[in-house]
Image (tube, helix red, strand yellow):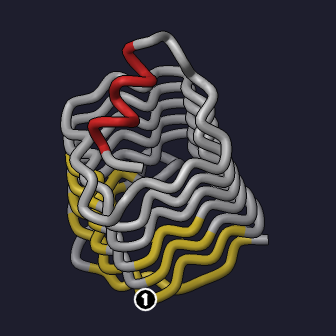
Amino acid sequence: MTAQEFLQLYVAVQKDFTGIKLEPGANLTGVDLTGANLSDANLAEVDLTGANLEGANLQNTNLPFSILMKTNFKRANLQGALLQETALVDAIFDEANFTNAQLAMCSIVGTNFRGAIFDNTSLIECVCRDTIWRDGKIIDDSMIQYTQN
């Protein structure tokens, strides 16, 4: 599905996009997807710069090679999501749920994870700079690799 087709459905007040597959390179810059259901979606290589996904359901969603710059994921459900080589720059993940998610080789810069849930989450070779962790501590110039159980 192209970004234009997706946006036409969204404008038509559709909020359930379970299992949707957007074409690589789809541009959803600045789109308001507050509370949308994108569970089991494939959003590989999608540009979500400045998008609002507050309270959205992204359970088991694939986001590899996506651009999440200044994207709002406050209270979003990212359980089981895959973020691989994804750019998380100045993104907001306050109180987001990353249970069973995998973040691998991500570039995480200026991102806020305050209050986020990381139960059984894998962070593999992610580079963090100026990032606020879930407990409010700032991670700067670190490569993190661990699984939180």
Residue 106 pos. (x, y %) = 36, 75
Query: Percent position (x, y) of residue 99?
Result: 73, 57
Q: Quadrant of the C terminus?
A: bottom right
* Dot 1 crowding, Cα within 10 Å, few <14, some 14–19, many 20+: some
Looking at this rendering, what residue extends furthest in the top direction? Answer: 13
Q: Residue at horizontal 24%, vertical 62%?
A: 25
- What is the x, y in percent for residue 140? 25, 69
Question: Where is 136 relative to 66, above or below?
Answer: above
Label count reads 1
Q: Regarding mark 1 in the picture, which secondary structure is present there?
A: strand
Report the residue at 74% width, 65% height from top.
100
Regarding residue 4, the answer to whether it shows in the image is yes
Q: Can residue 97 be seen at all in this image of the molecule?
A: no
For image coordinates 55% across by 27% down, the residue present is 36
Tell me: 93 left or right of 57: left
Image quadrant where residue 61 sits: bottom right
Q: Nearer the viewer, residue 73 or 32?
A: 32
In terms of depth relative to the viewer, which is nearer, 143 or 106? 106
* Amino acid of disc 1: Glu
Along the line of sight, which residue is nearer the eye, 62 or 73?
62
The answer to whether residue 49 is left or right of residue 34 is: left
Residue 38 is left or right of residue 12, and the answer is right
Disc 1 target residue: 125
> Of residues 44 and 127, which is closer to you in this image?
44
Q: Is residue 78 above or below residue 129?
A: above
**Image coordinates for residue 41, horizontal then vertical, percent:** 59, 53
Q: Residue at x 57, y 36 (%)?
A: 76
Give the image quarter of residue 105: bottom left
